[in-house]
Image (cartoon, grey):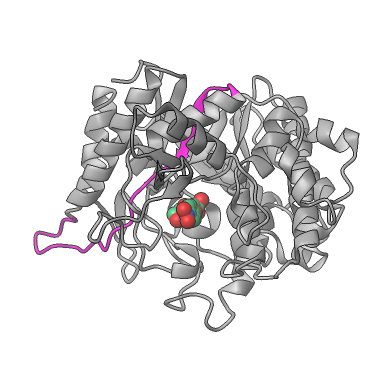
Amino acid sequence: MFNKDFIFGCATASYQIEGSINKDGKVENIWDRFTKTPGKILDNSDGSVVCDSYIKYKDDCKILANLGVKAYRFSISWSRVIDESNKPNQKGLDYYINLCKELLKYNIKPYVTLYHWDMPMWLEDLGGFLNDDISNYFMHYTDVVTKALDGLVTDYITINEPQCIMFLGHNICNHAPGVKYNDKDMLHAIHNLLLCHGKAVKVIRENVKNSKIGFAPCSRPMIPTDINNKLLYEKCYKEYFNVNRDNEYANDVSIYSDPIFLGDYPKEYYEIFKDILPNIKKEDLELIHQPLDYIYQNIYSATFYSLDKSNNLVKEAFPFGYPEGNIDWLQVVPKALYYGPKYLYERYKLPIIISENGFCNNDIVSLDNKVHDPERIDYINRYLIELDRVSKEIPIKGYFYWSLFDNFEWSYGLKKRFGLVYIDYNTGKRIEKDSYFEYKKIIEKGGI
Ligand code: PNW
């Protein structure tokens, strides 16, 4: 059982649910462009309708209220609220103002993500994260949003999953904008992204009374196969925060979180990238290192590790038939919610909120017109048991299920369903799945 003020919520993101991509002065963003590029989206779908939340936000709020959540995490579409001359678009802002007001009617607290991957196209054309002015644009956008939502929102998340922005968007390029960076540009862009975060935090602190701020990276924790082996635990911890100059460093944890929480890049970063370091000024590092209130973290899956005969850390393969979701990276490893928070707290020492965790299934509407999803129910229960266990050791403040709705799952399109609520994309009909009612029960009880 979690303590009384534990926050149960669920999460979504603008491009994945809103639709209405050309309405009320919204300008083009990188996902509007990317989804038009042949071959990029598995089922050729896009974000033009999805859950139609831009129109149906009042229904969304009712569904959230019936679920009993105290918190709803959603993101703001930059290209809806700022036009191509960098001026505020009031109609776009009104949507989020109305959404927040509606949520507050039901006593649901808005948790606002400022950047969940949908960069305005005109800013990408100016260089995106490689433009040294991007953090000033982001600061301006943050200023506009925080002033518009004044008195409605105290909880902000600056950036969602910097790892996916950089690794998927600029290395393997299966995400927008799909512009490949060389290593030197990658480090430069990461540094600019961290500056976006730092400057935004400053603006939020200035504009919002009693603000609570964090950023929401993702990670895939290393799980020791022998829970009593101290050396193995230490090596897993070390590996979790390690930076390597391999193809995947843009996916690492400490390259983003160390500057933000500890005020500098990890030592090994300076060593392994010494030939291509960006220009890192002392005042940049200070800007990036703004005090935060929480460690947010998106955690879905994990990988097992053991020690070989010479005590080297080795990755264990998942056995054939190991339980997994209907998406290639989602093996069901509940201990991810035990070890992930433990490692993060040990290093950064702030209360933890799981900003995303969820299960992808090939859900169908049954003959009885219901959606039965026992695998998702099992997933939520198993993961919450582990989160509950670790909450007896370290401060855990909340949990956001990803996602409220089935939605546009980026390069996979509409066929990957993570929702507690099923969306019939032909009719727009929403159907609460069995897991919705299960999560409702868990919330009512205050835990498992
Ligand atoms: C997150 N992984 O992405 C995003 O924040 C959401 O927008 C997305 O819909 C959700 O998780 C489900 O995919 C992730 O490879 C992408 O471990 C990849 C991974 C994790 C999260």
Residue 302: x and y in percent read 41, 46
Q: Residue furthest left?
A: 368
Q: Residue at x 34, y 39 (%)?
A: 225
Q: Position of residue 358 (x, y in %)?
A: 36, 47
Q: Is residue 338 left or right of residue 191?
A: left
State the residue in front, 230 or 242: 230
Image position of 203 with respect to 430: above or below: above
| Residue drawn at (68%, 30%) of the image | 261
Q: Quadrant of residue 233?
A: top left
Q: Is residue 108 above or below residue 336?
A: above
Which part of the image, by quadrant, shows the C terminus? Answer: top left
Please say whether residue 316 is one of the residues in the magenta stretch. Answer: no
Query: Which quadrant of the figure has residue 169?
Result: bottom right
Q: Residue furthest bottom?
A: 38
Assign the magenta stretch its main secondary structure: loop
Magenta segment boundaries in residue numbering:
349-371
Please identify the quadrant where the N terminus is shown.
Answer: top left
Residue 303, position in %: x, y?
Answer: 40, 48
198 displayed left or right of 427: right
Tell me if residue 357 is in the magenta stretch: yes
Q: Residue at x 81, y 52 (%)?
A: 134
